[in-house]
Image (tube, helix red, strand yellow):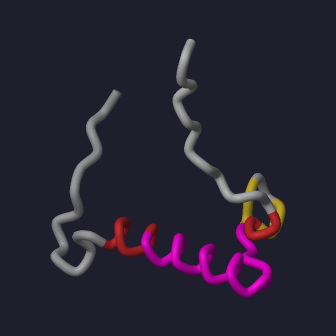
Amino acid sequence: MKKKELPKDPDLLGSMQALKRSAASALKLARQTNTPCYVMKDGKIVDIAARPAKTPKKASAGK
């Protein structure tokens, strides 16, 4: 497996992290305001705000 290379252009450094933060913020706002947040998935346009939010699983105590 080939290791990912960082872009050499200084304008592109950190761009992926910025896009991920922006997408997370848009999804959060859509859920707060009950509005759609559309993305392309598997060639189809889907509203990801309509899905339930992912919650981290809690460790079961006492097992």
Query: How many numbered discs sit on the rendered protein?
Result: 0
Q: Is residue 23 magenta?
A: yes
Q: Is residue 58 magenta?
A: no
Depth check, front residue: 34 or 37: 34
Vertical arrangement, residue 62 with respect to residue 8, above or below: above
Q: Position of residue 62 (x, y in %)?
A: 55, 17
Vertical arrangement, residue 14 with respect to residue 42, above or below: below
Q: Quadrant of residue 31?
A: bottom right
Q: Quadrant of residue 9?
A: bottom left
Q: Position of residue 30 (x, y in %)?
A: 69, 81
Q: Residue furthest front?
A: 62
Q: Quadrant of residue 44?
A: bottom right
Q: Position of residue 8 (x, y in %)?
A: 16, 66
Residue for point 79% across, 79% down: 36
Vertical arrangement, residue 57 with respect to residue 52, above or below: above
Depth check, front residue: 24 or 12: 24
Residue for point 74% across, 65% down: 48
- The quadrant of the picture occupied by the C terminus is top right
Residue for point 33% across, 73% down: 15
42 relative position to 57: left or right: right
Is most of the magenta stretch helix, strand or loop?
helix
Depth check, front residue: 23 or 32: 32
Which portion, as a residue range, is magenta? 21-39
Residue for point 35% across, 27% down: 1
Q: Position of residue 40 (x, y in %)?
A: 73, 65
Q: Residue furthest top?
A: 63
